[in-house]
Amino acid sequence: MSTTWEQMEGAALALVRAGPIKDRLADAFRNHLALVNTEELPEAIRSEFRACNEALTREHPLRGEDAVRATVRKMSNHEADEIACTVVRLFAALVRETTLQAAAAQVAAAAAAHVAATVAAQAAAVVNGAPAPAPARGKASVARVKGAKSVPQVISLYGAAESLS
């Protein structure tokens, strides 16, 4: 069973292969996009994914064809290009969202580990009768998650979180 990420990747790869754009678009939908569960997508891209699906299944089929084939047959090459670009942008957005979620989870785990270590050190100091150490201050002591990051920034954050582990 393929994941949503793998299906979106498969659709993007189907679109960059050789052949007429309409055939590639129909193939991407039938073999990949139709298998994606919309609820498994990040909230930020669900509506655009639904719009893309509707754009590919809006026509009533003739005898012997499906809605995708009928829709693709009636659209212009320019419109097919636009929808193909949308599919690739959706895949990129999915990768970006997934990477941000993973980085945020890594940072949260690192912050939790830091807090646990600080609390343990303070508790040990109190038990031993020594004054509790002051909490660490500075950029390295506090993990923060700011707004959306670019892919290189996320990779850097991921590397920093790995080095804290």
Image (cartoon, rainbow, N blue to C red):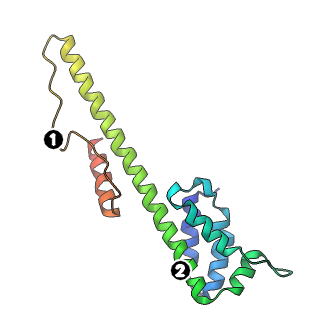
Nearer to us in this view, 62 or 162: 62
Q: Residue at x 63, y 67 (%)?
A: 33
Question: Which element carries disc 2, helix, strand or loop?
Answer: loop
Q: Which image quadrant is residue 96 in?
A: bottom left
Nearer to us in this view, 126 or 78: 78
Q: Is residue 17 above or below residue 132?
A: below
Q: Residue at x 75, y 81 (%)?
A: 70
Task: Locate residue 57 relative to residue 109 in the image: left or right.
Answer: right
Please identify the quadrant where the N terminus is shown.
bottom right
- Specify few, some or many for label 2: CA neighbours under 10 Å numbering under 14, 14-19, or 20 or more: few
- Location of mark 2 (residue): 16
Residue at the outermost right position: 63
Task: Locate residue 139 relative to residue 85 in the image: left or right.
Answer: left
Task: Locate residue 161 relative to residue 88 in the image: left or right.
Answer: left
Q: Are marks 1 and 2 in contact (CB under 8 Å)?
A: no
Q: Is residue 137 above or below residue 27?
A: above
Where does residue 8 sit, x and y in percent of width and height?
56, 66
Residue 138 is marked as: 1
Nearer to us in this view, 147 or 92: 147
Q: Amino acid at mark 2?
A: Val
Front tag of 1 and 2: 1
Where does residue 34 sit, x and y in percent of width and height?
67, 66
Q: Amino acid at mark 1?
A: Gly
Where does residue 155 sit, x and y in percent of width and height?
32, 58
Residue 29 is marked as: none
Q: Residue at x 65, y 69 (%)?
A: 53
Q: Residue at x 33, y 59 (%)?
A: 149
Distance of label 1 from label 2 (alpha carbons): 47 Å
Where does residue 120 sit, x and y in percent of width and height?
26, 22
Query: Nearer the N terminus, badge 1 or badge 2?
Result: 2
